[in-house]
Image (cartoon, rainbow, N blue to C red):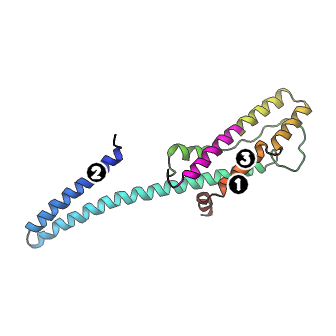
Amino acid sequence: MTAPRTWIMVVTAGSLTVAFVVSAAWWTRSAGTSRFEPAVQILGLLGGITGIVAERWAAGRERRAEALQAIGEELRDNRRILASPPFSVGAAQPARRQVYPRMNLSAVNAALSSAVLSPRRDEGLSSMLHDWRNEAEIFNHQLSLAEILAFTNGSDEVLRDLHQGLHGADGPLERMQEHLSGLLATPPLTAALAR
């Protein structure tokens, strides 16, 4: 089955060809100042079609740039969250119950669901964003489970184990920070954040 976009292109190209042939025949048969009328008609058709194509191309680039900017800002915010006191490494955290901030995913979800990223141009970035989203959702769920455990069984030993599990080598916090660093280093996001 042919996509509607292909049909639109075929009909548009066919209409332009027919209009061009009719205008060329009209031009050869007309005399005087009316000879310029077919040429003006052809230029008007070409200008209109070119304008539509150029506007769609520019709108697509603008939507992509806005999405990349939003994704970059959201990832920077997530990096700040991971550097905040509940997650900060180095300082010995007291064993206490706490509610952890969650990773933001709205810009990534919007970009992936709206198909604003080009399948060919942004294939690598799109794949990395899918991986990031999955890891961030798992991380957020792990935080929820840790909070439930901490608030229902708040012994000091459980709280220390949760803190060590979160901050341990190759733990979820370290994986999230690695994902963020990799994403923020990609050329599309680096360029979007430089604007």
SS for dot 2: helix
Cα separation, mark 2 vs mark 3, equals 48 Å
Cα separation, mark 1 vs mark 3, equals 9 Å
Q: Quadrant of residue 132?
A: top right
Q: Which residue is mark 3?
A: 176
Q: Which residues are magenta?
A: 119-138
Magenta stretch holds residue 96: no
Instruction: Say whether residue 131 is left or right of residue 142.
Output: left
Q: Which residue is mark 1?
A: 181
Residue 164: image x %, image y %? 86, 40
Q: Which residue is mark 2?
A: 10
Kindly identify the residue that appears in the image at 8 percent across and 71 percent down. Answer: 31
Cα separation, mark 2 vs mark 1, equals 45 Å
> Mark 1 or mark 3: which comes first in sequence?
3
Residue 194: image x %, image y %? 62, 63
Q: Is residue 96 visible?
A: no
Is residue 133 depicted above or below 18 in this figure? Answer: above
SS for dot 3: helix
